[in-house]
Image (cartoon, grey):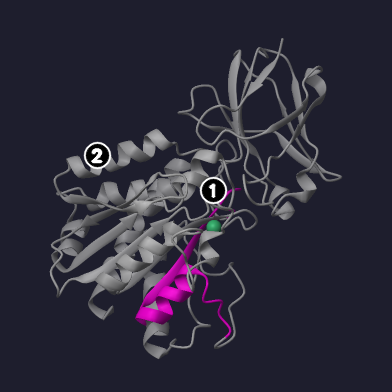
Amino acid sequence: MLKISTRFHAGSVIVNDLSDPQNIRLALRPDNAAAFAQWFYFRLQGAAYQNCVMHFENAASAAYPEGWQDYQARASYDRQNWFCVPTSYENGVLTINHTPLSNSVYYAYFEPYSGEQHLNLLGDAQGSGLCQIDDLGSTVEGRDINLLTIGNQVESDLKIWITARQHPGETMAEWFVEGLLGRLLDPQDPTARALLDQATFYIVPNMNPDGAALGNLRTNAAGANLNREWENPTAERSPEVFYVREKMLETGVDLFLDIHGDESLPYIFVAGTEGVPTYNARIAALENRFKAAFAAASPDFQDEEGYPKAAPGQADLSWANNWVGNRFQCLSYTLEMPFKDNNNLPDDDFGWNGQRSLRLGEAVLSAVLAVLPDLR
Ligand code: ZN
């Protein structure tokens, strides 16, 4: 007897028919208050050594159907080790074909980052003795919006802001923050010490804890796409952005990185602020220095593939990186990692995953150090 369940953090799928293991009929469940669908995460029980063919029949109406080309779903028996399973996309249907070796197995769009991991991350950071945790306010559903502050917090310090997971299905963003934090809080790491000599870091590891818990791809509990709320956030519809933005206005910002995952492009890349009104030659030079240093620090990073650049003055200021870059006239990036894999350094067994995101988060600090003297 097969069973599929989703009653855990980020669990999400619709089961239409589970009577035939060779034809399990599923559907992607949209965000709780918006039409975006792409994230799935479910547990299958009772299927040891049975060939299971699982069809997502509405995959063509996903938020990014091109995200299914050359995509492999992830699976795990213990929720610690995640691996790729054979996946195909034909005639609008996404199909996972897998024979589990145990009676209990999990399948997900990408390696999850749970609510318990999030709270452990905060606890470990605070336990380091180098990190102050502040509560900026509550989400729509009453979860905590936490800010981690690391550094001396003196006026002369450069103010480095990092936010992750505005889009809650992009779990690689919080893995990235875990890597960055681990290095920054390592008192034996010379890069961390040099950085904290001159800079204070403000880090929001999860901008969208409601959406994460609900298993949403893209929106918060009120259906708001937070990365389109930065011009006019409200405490009712987008408190996550509202409170973080208020704090930024209080501290100032000298460098901003907003961490994301991209459904379609199999590369690691950044998107800058070339289309905002205050963009200038100083920012352009900083961008070039940052990208060169990042590529030197991590062969995963590249600058050939990415989003089309906005024309001068045409940037959408409702995006976090554009709003911040324009308001504070600082170096400001959206950083994207793939759901698929990095095609320049592919891994057929695991694809892009949590550990690789974590390593990239460690590496980015070298790029931050390289631009530090010129940020202000
Ligand atoms: Zn995103």
Across and down, in percent, residue 4 comes to: 66, 22
Taking the image in four quarters, ligand 1 sits in the one at bottom right
Q: Compared to 350, does 44 lie above or below? A: above
> Which residue lies at the image location 67% right of the left edge and 34% below the top edge?
13
Q: Which amino acid is tagged 2?
A: Asp
> For the residue labelled by badge 2, is the local secondary structure a helix, a strand or a loop?
helix
Q: Compared to 228, does 143 lie above or below? A: above
Which range is magenta?
Answer: 314-343
Note whether ligand 1 is within 8 Å of mark 2. Answer: no
Across and down, in percent, residue 361 comes to: 37, 53
Q: Quadrant of the C terminus?
A: bottom left
Q: Is residue 339 left or right of residue 1?
A: left
Q: Look at the image and tell me whether residue 241 can be seen.
A: yes
Mark 2 or 1, nearer chain start: 2
Residue 27 sits in quarter: top right
> Which residue lies at the image location 37% right of the left edge and 40% below the top edge?
118
The residue labelled by disc 1 is 221
Closest to the observer, 190 or 168: 168
Which dot marks residue 323? none
> For the residue labelled by badge 1, is the local secondary structure a helix, a strand or a loop?
loop
Across and down, in percent, residue 29 comes to: 68, 40
The residue labelled by disc 2 is 124
Q: Which amino acid is tagged 1?
A: Ala
Tell me how far mark 2 sits from mark 1, CA to CA: 27 Å
Closest to the observer, 201 or 186: 201
Closest to the observer, 342 or 318: 318
Q: Look at the image and tell me whether residue 298 can be seen.
A: no
Q: Quadrant of the N terminus?
A: top right
Q: Is residue 320 left or right of residue 371?
A: right
Q: Compared to 70, does 350 lie above or below? A: above
